[in-house]
Image (cartoon, rainbow, N blue to C red):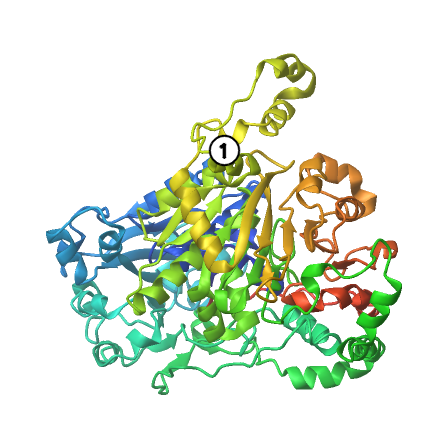
Amino acid sequence: MPTLLLFFDRRRFLFNVGEGFHRFSNEHKFKLSKVDHVFLTRVCTETIGGLPGLILSLAEINETVKTWGPSSLNDFAKAARIFVPSGWLEHTHSFGPGINDDACLLSPSSPPIFLMEDELIKISAVLLSSEHAALNKANYASSTDERKGNMLSAVYICELSTVRGKFDPVKARSKGLSPGRKYGLLQRGESVLSDDGTKMVHPEDVLGPSSPGPIVLVVDCPSASYISSLINSASLQSFFPGSGKVVNCMIHIGPPSVTSLEAYQSWMENFKVTDHIMARREMSVLGEPTLTSSVKLRSRLNMVCPWFFPSVEVNDETQKPAVNSRMAIGKNLLKYRLRPLADLGLDTSEVLEGFDSAAFQKEMATDVMKAQEMAQEIWKRWSEGKFISSLLDRGTRGEKCLPACLHDVSREEMEVVFLGTGSSQPSKHRNVTGIYIHLFERGGLLLDCGEGTFAQLKRRYGAEGADNVLMGLKCIWISHMHADHFLGLGRILSARKELLERCSIYDPLLVVGPKLLKSFLDSYGKIEDLMMEFLDCSQTTLEAKKCADNGNVRGGEYRRGSLIHGSLRTGERNRMQHIWNLPGYHISRGIDMEGRRRLRSVLSLLGLKDLISVPVIHCLHAFGVVLEAEDRRITENARKPGWKLVFSGDTRPCQALVDAAQGATILIHEATFDDALIADAVKKNHSITKEAIQVGVHAGVYRIFLTHFSQRYPKIPAFDNRFHDRTCFAFDMMSVNLADLPVVPEFVPALQTLFQDQSDTEEDAEETTAVCP
C-alpha cells in the first residue's frame, strides 16, 4: 500500500502508513519528527501497518501525531492501547458512521466532511461504501466478514490556500510607500500605513490578481464494489469540468485490478486536465528496491556465500494500466510539485532507479575477491565430502562426531530463514525480528513477526513464492509483547486470509503468544477478520504439557508468601519477575485442553514432536521456544532422532533456557549488545555476545546463531573468534539448510574479511517540498 507524503517547509501530512515506512524513512533521511497529521483512507493492515512504529518512534522524542480516519479508527485505537502511548489516543479523530451504523445508506449527495484548515491547506474527506454493505446491513449478524463488508474508504480532498498575486513595487510607490519592511507585510497579506501616515494601504492595492491554490485528490477504491459509490458522489462530481474548481493532481492508490476496470477509467475521463498518478502496482519489491543499502548488502553476501544468501529473480509487473500524457506510474520518491505554481507538475529527479545486481557485483568484484576465494574453497571441500570426512576424523572443540539427526539428512528436511536480525527499530541493513522455519512440503512456521516481515518474505522468495509461504504457513509463535517482535503479525494474517479466500478455503492459523496478544487480536478482529485461532504461550510450557498428559485440567499452584519480604528489597519489578518464574504460575488458571489438541494437530502436520515455550528473563510474559522434530524413519525397524531447535526470544542468560536447550541441534540466541556493554544488557534484560554463546556451550548445543543485534552494529557485530567452531552471526535473508549445519561456522572468517574495512558513507539527503507516493 503506497504511503503519500505532502509536505511544506515546516509541516508534514502523511496519507496511510504502510508497513516498512519507518525503515524507508531511515534509508532516505526523512525526519519523522516533523509529521503533524496522518490521514488513513481505510483502517486495515494495509494502511496502518507502519502506524504503531511511527507512534512509538515519535514517543521516544516526546512527540505525537494527530491521526484521522473512518470510524473504525476508534476500534484500532482501543486495540493499540496495549502497546502505544496513551497520549496518542487523545489525538485520534474518526469520522463517518460506525461499523454497525447505516454505512450502506451513505447518501451520494452528502457534502464532504470537513477535517482541518490552516494557513496552508484545507483537508476534507468523502466517504465511499461497498455495495455489499447494504446486504450485510439487511442480514446483519456479528461476523467479522460482514463488518469488513461495511468498511468505509475515504477520498481526501486537499485544497492548498490561495496564491496571492505578484507584488507590484510601482503601485506601492504610488501609494506613498518606500522599499522596506512594509513591502514584506503587504506580501504576507497585512495592511500598512503610508509613509506620511495619511492613509492605509491594503494588500489588494499593490498585489496582482490571486490564483486559486492547487487541489490534490487521494482516491482509494479498494474493490469493484466501491466504484458505484465513487462515480455517484456529488461531492466529487463538483470537481468535474465547468465547476470552477480544477483538480491538479489525482493520486490513485486502489489496486490495478480495480483502477483498470472500464467503469473506473470512464470516471477518470471526467478529469481530463488532471495529472493522474497510479501509485499502486502489483510487482516484486525487488524490481525497484526501496531499500538500496539492504539490497547492496545482500548482493555482496550473495557474491561470497550464495549457498546461504540466494538471489531472487525479479517478476515483471502483472498489470500495466493504460498510460497517456496525463497519467504517470507511481514510483518510489516520485514527486508532484505544487508550489511555486510555475513548477507545478511531476518531478522525477529523485526517483529510485532499478537495481542492476550483475553490474553492482561486477563493480564489487575486486573488493570481495579475498572473501570470495576463502568461501569458495570451503564450499568446494564441503560439496566434495572432504570437509565432513575430516570433521568425523578429528572432531572439533566439544564434538566427537556429527549429531545423529544430521547423518544422511535430506535437503528437504528443514531450513532456517532469518527475515529480521535487528532489535528495537528497523534500520537500513537489518529489519526487526522474524524467523521462518521452512519445512518444505509440510509448510512452515514463523518465530516472531516484526513489522515488515511480509515484505521480507517477498524479498526472499519473490511475490509468488511469498504467497506460497503464506498458504503453507501452519503456526506463528510470538515471544513477547514488545513491538519489534509482533507488529508484522496483522499484515501476515490479513494477506494469508485474502489468499485463502480466493481459493474458497477456510483454515484458521494457529497463533501462539503471550496472553496480552489475544486482547489485541480480539479488539482488532472487530475491524477485520484475520482467520486465526489463539493459544496462550503459558499453555505450551513443559508444566502445561505434563498436566495435560496426566489429565490434570486444573493446572498447578504457586505460593506468593515467600516473596513478600523479598519484594521490599528487590523492588516491584524484580518481585514480579520472581513470581513469573515460579513453578505453576503459568498454569494456575487451568489447562486449555482444546487449545492443546489444536496445537498437537498442527505439530503433526508439520512433522514436529513438540513445541515447548520456556519462560525467560526479559519482561512479564516473555518466552523462548523449543521445537523438536519427529524421529526419522530409516528402515522398518530403525529410526534416527529428529532435530531440535531453540529460540531464546529476548532474555538475560537464564538456567531455564540452558536446561531446555540441552543437546539442541540449533540455538538461535539474542546478542543485543557486544561484550563491552554488559551494564546496558543487564539494565535492559538482554544478553551480550559472550553470554549468548555460553548458554549454547553449557547446553551442549551443536550450532549457535546470534541475532537481535543492536542497530549500532549495522553490518557485522563484534565477535569472539574463540567460539567460531560452533557459532555464526545471522544476517537478514540468511537461509541455512539443516544439511549444511556442519560447515556454517567455517564461513565466519570469510564474512569478517568481507566487512573488515566497511563503513557507512552515505550522505544525508536534503528534503524537498512535494507530494511523494
Vertical relation: 41 (above or below) 740: above
* Secondary structure under the numbered disc 1 in the rendered image: helix
- Residue 81 % position (x, y): 43, 38
- Can see residue 673? yes
**Between 734 and 213, which is closer to the camera in this rendering?**
734
Q: Which residue is mark 1?
A: 547
**Which image quarter is the C terminus in?**
bottom left
**Between 771 and 297, which is closer to the camera in this rendering?**
297
**Which image quarter is the N terminus in?**
bottom left
- At horizontal 45% and vertical 55% (from top left) the residue drawn is 49
- Can see residue 18? no
For disc 1, the neighbor class at 10 Å (few under 14, some 14 to 19, many from 20) is many
Vertical relation: 269 (above or below) 686: below
Q: How many marks?
A: 1
- Residue 479 % position (x, y): 56, 45
- At horizontal 64% and vertical 53% (from top left) the residue drawn is 644
In the picture, residue 355 is in which quadrant?
bottom right
- At horizontal 70% and vertical 52% (from top left) the residue drawn is 709
Q: Residue furthest front?
A: 637
**Between 446 and 150, which is closer to the camera in this rendering?**
446
Vertical relation: 424 (above or below) 251: above
Query: 743 left or right of 445?
Result: right
- Residue 671 % position (x, y): 72, 49
Vertical relation: 245 (above or below) 641: below
- Residue type at mark 1 is Cys
- Residue 462 % position (x, y): 51, 74
